[in-house]
Amino acid sequence: MKVWTVANQKGGVGKTTTTVSLGGLLAGWGLRTLLVDMDPHGSLTSYFKYDPDTLEDSAFSLFQAAARKQRLAPGRLICPTGTPDLSLLPAAMALATLDRIAGKMEGMGLVLKRALSQLRDQYDFVLIDCPPILGMLLINALAACERLVIPVQTEFLALKGLERMLHTLEMVLKSRRSPLPYHIVPTLYDRRTRAAKEALEVLRETYGEHLWGEAIPVDTRFREASKAGLPPSLYDPKARGVAAYSELARVLLEAEGGEAAVPVGLETT
């Protein structure tokens, strides 16, 4: 089981869209995929028509059980998405209270990692959607993952969020026993605007080694897919945004295990 975290310490850069898009593609290629919503706002949870305000079982339950030193089978918290091979561990608004009620308890930074280890035989991939702030939720997501995907909107204010994210990553790497490869993914790219082109050029000049070579375009089909509660690749397989995420997924899969990791027949257009 491979665990990828999608994170950036700035909101509105396409984290949830990236999580759903990559997850939908992996599931569509027959890979059992779990999406984990670690954001108290619950955008990923709401995407699949669950209400983070009313859910009794959610990711918050994992932290409640850990704080009370109780055993909890994480499988009982998982919800269907309506898409084959794609499941969801939803968020609850109560996650916003986590730093206040459990911030000083030992071992709380590894709650998610321990929970996912119990699901290792059930899934091929886990994708974690994160809040845009540094706290226990983001620390858990970084501790649990083996690969980090950092979506960055192609505009200059978003570049500051990237700097903060990389500073956080540097701190996390000091406490990890293993490296954490990361990929910076330009998003919301509008090739018609000079600002977007200039921001993309700055990204390429500054972060070339870790920067994915393409960019995710602005695509209204993402919004329509969200309204329908479907991964974009299922809503409109021919959308240009889906084509871009397909190429990104191919690159990420190759990074995991070489050419053999890429599903046969995968389009690269």
Image (spheres, rainbow, N blue to C red):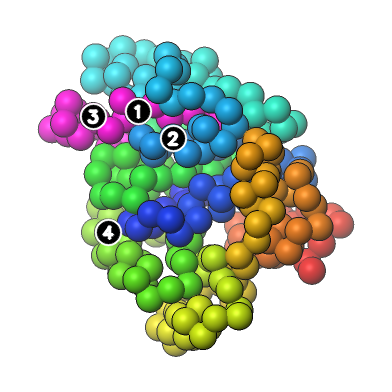
Judged from the image, the secondary structure of the residue bearing numbered disc 4 is helix
Q: Amino acid at mark 4?
A: Thr
Please check the rendered image and state whether residue 93 is part of the magenta-colored stretch, yes or no: yes
| Crowd tier of the residue under label 3, counting other residues whose Cα lies within 10 Å: few below 14, some 14–19, many 20 or above | few
Judged from the image, the secondary structure of the residue bearing numbered disc 3 is helix
The residue that label 2 is drawn on is 42
Where the N terminus falls, by quadrant? Answer: top right
| Crowd tier of the residue under label 4, counting other residues whose Cα lies within 10 Å: few below 14, some 14–19, many 20 or above | some
Q: Which is more toward the observer, 82 or 191?
A: 191
| Crowd tier of the residue under label 2, counting other residues whose Cα lies within 10 Å: few below 14, some 14–19, many 20 or above | many
Q: CA distance from mark 4 to mark 1?
A: 24 Å
The residue that label 3 is drawn on is 97
Q: Which residues are magenta?
A: 88-111
Q: Image point 34% across, 51% down: which residue?
A: 132
Q: CA distance from mark 2 to mark 1?
A: 7 Å
The residue that label 1 is drawn on is 93
Q: Amino acid at mark 2?
A: Gly
Q: Image point 34% across, 71% down: which residue?
A: 157
Tell which circle, 4 or 2, labels the residue nearer the N-terminal end.
2
Where the C terminus falls, by quadrant? Answer: bottom right
